[in-house]
Amino acid sequence: MSTLAVRLDPHAVDVLFANDAVHFVLADGREIAAPLEWFPRLRDANDRQRENWRLIGKGVGVHEDIAVSTLIG
């Protein structure tokens, strides 16, 4: 029996918003989400403002001072 080696890459490549959550798509295909309640500036932003995000540090975080590694645990 062989096993598939999966290379985990916790860098974000995309950010998506739902009504009550922010979703991060990671380079390895995983998706993680966090409640918007955790991020008051994003929670209170309108849709146009939320779409004005940018990745920092080659995907280690998002401009709103969100580090992907803190969400993974």
Image: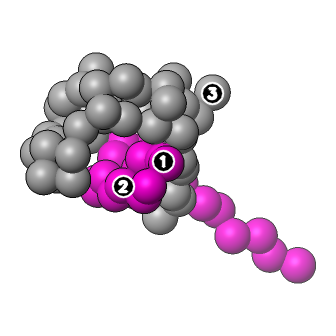
Q: Please give the range of residues in magenta.
A: 1-28
Task: Kindly identify which numbered label has been placed on residue 73.
Answer: 3
Q: In the displayed structure, would residue 57 be above or below residue 18? A: above
Magenta segment: does it hold 7?
Answer: yes
Q: Nearer the viewer, residue 65 or 49?
A: 49
Q: What residue appears at the point 49 percent right and 26 percent down from the top-left corner?
A: 38
Q: Are marks 3 and 2 in contact (CB under 8 Å)?
A: no
Q: Is residue 11 left or right of residue 58?
A: right
Other-residue count near label 1 (Cα within 10 Å), few / some / many at <14 / 14–19 / ≥20: some
- For the residue labelled by badge 3, is the local secondary structure a helix, a strand or a loop? loop
Task: Tell me the residue that label 1 is attached to.
Answer: 21
User: Which residue type carries mark 3?
Assistant: Gly
The residue most toward the bottom is: 1
Q: Is residue 20 left or right of residue 51?
A: right
Task: Tell me the residue that label 2 is attached to.
Answer: 17
Other-residue count near label 2 (Cα within 10 Å), few / some / many at <14 / 14–19 / ≥20: some
Q: Quadrant of the N terminus?
A: bottom right
Magenta segment: does it hold 50?
Answer: no
User: Which residue type carries mark 2?
Assistant: Phe
Q: Which quarter of the picture shows residue 71?
A: top right
Q: Nearer the viewer, mark 3 or mark 2?
A: 2
Q: Quadrant of the C terminus?
A: top right
Q: Which quarter of the picture shows residue 18?
A: bottom left
Q: Nearer the viewer, residue 33 or 29?
A: 33
Residue 57 in percent (x, y) is at 20, 29
Q: Earlier in the sequence, mark 3 or mark 2?
A: 2
